[in-house]
Image: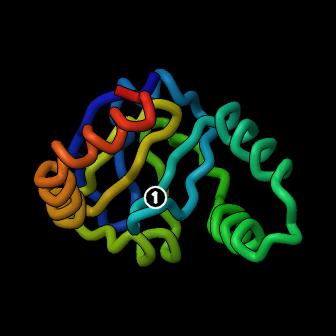
Amino acid sequence: MLLGEYIHTLDEKKRIILPKKFKDELGKKLVLTRGLDKCLFLYSKKEWENVVQNLKQLSFTQADTRGFTRFMFSGATEIDLDKSGRILIPDSLKRFAGLKGKVVFAGVSDRVEVWDEARWKKYTAKVEKQGDELAEKLGEIGVL
């Protein structure tokens, strides 16, 4: 399970060191794609195949399904870790997530989310303010 939060710096060539804990768990062949909330989703090849299978089961006759499937697949790219444990983030994904200097890697169970540090701080501050409300909603559906 992917857990934790790590901050690293994007270098001038758009490369960034993947945290060792995530590198060990994800492997060397990865898939990076646009995520939700203006972050990137980073998957192991195996976990990406699970995402693919789940999306393939959805009906393409639904406009929302087509849109989300296009969003995920057209933004996806296969990447390899280099010898130094770095990944190269394509310009289109870097722009999408607004990645600049400091980047946050957040482990979220089956994937790693890649955030611009300022955007991450703003997002987590918002969620923390809503903590009680979110817990109540999750309790209503039996999650907590």
Could you tell me which secondary element the residue under label 1 belongs to?
strand
Residue found 65% across the figure and 34% down from its top: 47
Q: Is residue 141 above or below residue 100?
A: above
Q: Is residue 38 left or right of residue 134?
A: right
**Residue 115 image position (x, y, % from top left):** 32, 58
Residue 117, picture quadrant? bottom left
- Which of 49/27 is in front? 49
Assign the C terminus to one quadrant of the image: top left
Residue found 46% across the figure and 22% down from its top: 1
Residue at which label 1 appears: 40
Q: Is residue 49 above or below residue 104?
A: above
**Residue 60 image position (x, y, % from top left):** 86, 66
Q: Is residue 66 left or right of residue 108?
A: right
Residue found 27% across the figure and 50% down from its top: 104
Amino acid type indicated by mark 1: Leu
Q: How is the image coloured?
A: rainbow
**Residue 44 image position (x, y, % from top left):** 60, 35
Q: Is residue 96 left or right of residue 135?
A: right
